[in-house]
Image: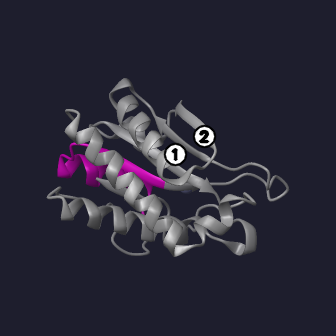
Amino acid sequence: MIDPGHGGRDPGAVGINGLQEKQVIFPISLRVAELLEQQGIAVVLTRQDDSTLDLQARVDIANRARGSLFVSIHANAISLSRPDVNGVETYFASETGRRLAATLQASMLGATGMNDRGVKQARFYVLRHTAMPAALVEVGFVTGAQDAPRLADPAWRETMAQAIARGILQYIQQGG
Ligand SMILES: [Zn+2]
């Protein structure tokens, strides 16, 4: 299960030069799905277009599909007055998601050399209510002076998509 955050009426975070979270993470999500499918992994996206989808709908799609893992893809934000805050972080809610989160974080850091903000536990709705190992990646800050130009760059997004797909494959190969 790949869950592109936000969408439709909900742009997610808005950062430097009006950069919208949904515009960053949707192409990354589609590319992650494509890369995994090329490796023979069956992928279900919670949304396939720029539609508005609430959190319960995302959980319902994942649980109905009986996904074996769930990765929600987001970009981060803090105040526009804090361009000094940059980096990648990954969340899990329950122990079943911890290794998935750690594998994804390591893969993203290895591929991009971005600032490491760590693997963290948080009670995000989509992580708590999905019935499979689940992680939420924050691929950088739309408000960050270092991150925002990267997030806006299609070549960087390809690198990030490859890193996330590689992390998922590593997790599966290590026993799922
Ligand atoms: Zn988000």
Residue for badge 2: 116
Element on which disc 2 rests: strand
Ranked by sequence position, the earlier of labels 2 and 1 is: 1
* Left or right: 169 as drawn, with respect to 16: left
Q: Which residue occupies the foreground of this view, 62 or 74?
A: 74
User: Which image quarter has ligand 1?
Assistant: bottom right
* Type of the residue with mark 1: Leu
- CA gap between label 2 and label 1 equals 7 Å
Q: Which residue occupies the foreground of this view, 115 or 11?
A: 115
Residue 102 vertical placement versus 81 (above, below): above
Task: Report if residue 44 is visible in the image.
Answer: no
Residue extending farthest to the top is 95
The disc at residue 109 is 1
**Residue 89 drawn in magenta:** no
At horizontal 78% and vertical 54% (from top left) the residue drawn is 79
Q: How many marks?
A: 2
Residue extending farthest to the right is 81
**Residue 55 drawn in magenta:** yes
Span highlighted in magenta in the image: 52-73
Residue 89 horizontal/vertical position (percent): 56, 42
